[in-house]
Image: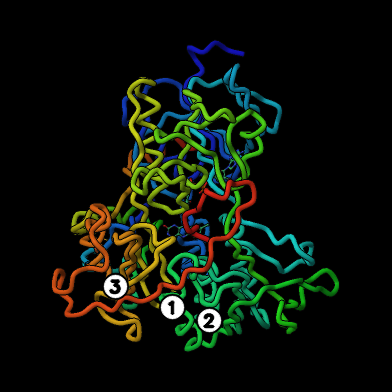
């Protein structure tokens, strides 16, 4: 699956890191490092991270779009 | 050509602005034909990780594809370059000789890395970083352990690259024509904090110096000659000298375009050479130069991620609106960068600032918030690892709050006003001298 984090918006609150520690990690004081292409089976956890983010910085490609519109 | 009924909307450029612009058209209720033409062979991907986690080896260049957020039902023409535009017939021409008619055109062709054009440009071992392929090629060259990496240019991408190279344990030299890294973006006063990080990380920073020539042996780079008469033995050179825009197909069609961008009116509609907007051609993202009402209608290009999305969404709304009902695009620039373990974030445009004040933390601790002032107003703020303060400053910039900030008004005891140390503005090829550019993400 494909995700992106708006790092202008991200405040380094690290809520996503608690929700899905394998895919979101804080480095240094506040650099968010995340996996832009986590495996599809992790979707529930990634969605939990999205919901946990207080500034709604995480965008996730909906499952039903993944197979559509392939260039 | 086929009739205009079926021509629909065509987006040129299949990257961040192109994708988000196309999605905004569908979100805005557009159900007609939609075509996206992009000259890279890949679906839209994200560039910021390329000069950070991809070079560091933490992410694969292929893993950076952008999520689709809306069903597009678009016709994608990837690996195709648009080379011609006929504004009267409303048709674009592709490099393969085919033509696509349009009702409205969204130009989202971004920018390209400025190449090395002085002596040695033909040598192997000389890299730039703009595309996924560039980053993958540079990453594999770094992984084969070069003897010394030379980075030319201390802008955002040059400094991020230096940070990755030093993390990889590679001997690294960075040559910059300014007295400090990031001088054009943040001024030398803040830039010197990064110079300090470079010194601690063992990066050899050469201030106020130019590379005059690259020299090779057997077709591969071996040495750089510097303006101070010295030479650096290097087998891998990264040219990080900013970006140019390939707009020849637009200027040949009578639009006001050059390597600095495609000039638009406040509604993101492209201007022709007479200065009149073409009502069917819009632009967004790194390629667009428009009068930003936020800065007194100063013509600006903003080469940052957030603008590509916001401007593409704005242009899409105007495309779907009546020509008599167009909204001006007002934008407060913002970007982030990460390097040497520090999260750098800014809001506003520090360019041309006459004064700066450290309002939280200190330069010496490398954790601080600096605000920039021009003509008595707050115009920008930068945070080094103090991102939580930034939103309140965004508000102050929006309302053009007084600079320097009144002590006690926020929660500092005393504000020292310092010279931000911006270099004199550089002359831009093809642009009138009154056109000042936004600091590029380059
Ligand atoms: C290495 C790197 C790191 C960055 N890091 C950050 C960061 O940390 N923070 C930040 O805010 N910003 C960052 N940026 C800037 C950000 O990525 C850009 O602002 C953004 O990509 C602009 O999007 P765009 O769609 O306007 O242009 P682009 O991403 O440049 O896309 C334009 C697309 O159009 C295609 N194209 C061009 N001409 C034609 C043609 N004639 N026919 C068909 N297709 C064409 C191009 O090949 C390209 O695919 C970074 C940029 C780079 C290169
Ligand atoms: S929860 Fe949101 S704000 Fe916090 S680190 Fe994650 S993305 Fe950033």
Q: Is residue B212 left or right of residue B366?
A: right
Q: Are marks 2 and 1 in contact (CB under 8 Å)?
A: yes
What is the x, y in percent for residue B431? 59, 47
Label 3, residues with CA under 10 Å away: few <14, some 14-19, many ≥20:
many
Q: Residue at x 35, y 23 (%)?
A: B321
Going from N to C along the chain, the mark reached first, 2 or 1, is 2
Where ligand 2 lies, by image quadrant? Answer: bottom left
Q: Nearer the viewer, residue B364 or B353?
A: B353
Going from N to C along the chain, the mark reached first, 2 or 3, is 2
Q: Residue furthest front?
A: B375
Q: Please name the residue that numbered disc 1 is placed on.
A: B340
Q: CA distance from mark 1 to mark 3?
A: 17 Å
Q: Chain of mark 1?
A: B
Looking at the picture, do discs 2 and 1 lie on one chain?
yes
Label 2, residues with CA under 10 Å away: few <14, some 14-19, many ≥20:
some
Mark sitting on residue B202: none
Mark sitting on residue B166: 2
Instruction: Describe the element under mark 3 as helix, strand or loop.
Output: strand
Q: Is residue B35 left or right of residue A18?
A: right
Label 1 beta carbon less than 8 Å to ligand 1: no
Q: Please name the residue that numbered disc 3 is placed on.
A: B369
What is the x, y in percent for residue B150? 65, 76
Front disc: 1 or 3: 3
What is the x, y in percent for residue B3? 54, 10
Q: Nearer the viewer, residue B322 or B73?
A: B322
What is the x, y in percent for residue B352? 43, 61
């Amino acid at each position: 699956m494909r995700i992106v984090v708006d790092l202008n918006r991200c405040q380094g609150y690290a809520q996503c890191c608690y929700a899905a520690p394998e895919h979101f990690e804080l480095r240094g004081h506040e650099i968010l490092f995340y996996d832009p292409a986590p495996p599809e089976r992790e979707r529930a956890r990634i969605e939990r991270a999205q919901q946990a983010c207080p500034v709604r910085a995480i965008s996730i490609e909906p499952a039903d779009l993944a197979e559509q519109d392939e260039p | 050509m086929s009739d205009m009924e079926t021509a629909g909307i065509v987006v040129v450029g299949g990257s961040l602005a192109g994708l988000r612009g196309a999605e905004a058209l569908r979100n805005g209720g557009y159900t007609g034909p939609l075509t996206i033409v992009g000259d890279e062979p890949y679906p839209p991907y994200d560039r910021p990780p390329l000069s950070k986690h991809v070079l560091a080896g933490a992410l694969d260049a292929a893993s950076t594809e952008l999520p689709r957020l809306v069903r597009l039902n678009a016709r994608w023409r990837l690996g195709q370059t648009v080379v011609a535009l006929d504004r009267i017939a409303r048709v674009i021409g592709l490099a393969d000789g085919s033509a696509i008619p349009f009702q409205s055109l969204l130009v989202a062709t971004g920018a390209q890395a400025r190449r090395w054009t002085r002596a040695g440009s033909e040598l192997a071992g000389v890299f730039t970083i703009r595309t996924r392929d560039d980053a993958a090629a540079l990453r594999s060259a770094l992984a084969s352990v070069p003897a010394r990496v030379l980075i030319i240019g201390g802008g955002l991408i040059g400094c991020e690259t230096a940070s990755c190279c030093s993390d990889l344990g590679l001997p690294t030299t960075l040559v910059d024509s300014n007295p400090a890294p990031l001088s054009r973006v943040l001024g030398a006063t803040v830039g010197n904090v990064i110079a300090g990080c470079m010194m601690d990380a063992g990066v050899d920073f050469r201030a106020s110096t130019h590379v005059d020539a690259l020299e090779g042996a057997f077709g591969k780079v071996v040495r750089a000659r510097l303006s101070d008469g010295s030479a650096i033995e290097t087998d891998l050179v990264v040219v990080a000298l900013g970006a140019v825009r390939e707009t020849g197909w637009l200027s040949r069609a009578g639009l006001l375009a050059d390597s600095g961008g495609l000039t638009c009116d406040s509604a993101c509609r492209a201007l022709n050479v007479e200065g009149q907007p073409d009502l069917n051609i819009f632009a967004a993202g790194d390629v667009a130069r428009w009068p930003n009402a936020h800065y007194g209608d100063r013509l600006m290009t903003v080469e940052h991620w957030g603008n590509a999305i916001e401007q593409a969404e704005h242009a899409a709304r105007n495309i779907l609106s009546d020509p008599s009902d167009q909204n001006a695009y007002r934008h407060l620039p913002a970007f982030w960068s990460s390097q040497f373990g520090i999260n750098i974030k800014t809001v506003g445009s520090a360019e041309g600032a006459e004064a700066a004040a450290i309002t939280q933390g200190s330069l010496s601790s490398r954790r601080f918030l600096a605000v920039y002032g021009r003509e008595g107003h707050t115009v920008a703020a930068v945070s080094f690892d103090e991102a939580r303060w930034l939103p309140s400053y965004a508000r102050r910039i929006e309302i053009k709050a007084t600079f320097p900030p009144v002590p006690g008004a926020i929660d500092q005891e005393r504000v020292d006003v310092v010279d931000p140390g911006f270099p004199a503005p550089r002359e831009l090829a093809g642009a009138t001298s009154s056109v000042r550019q936004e600091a590029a993400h380059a």
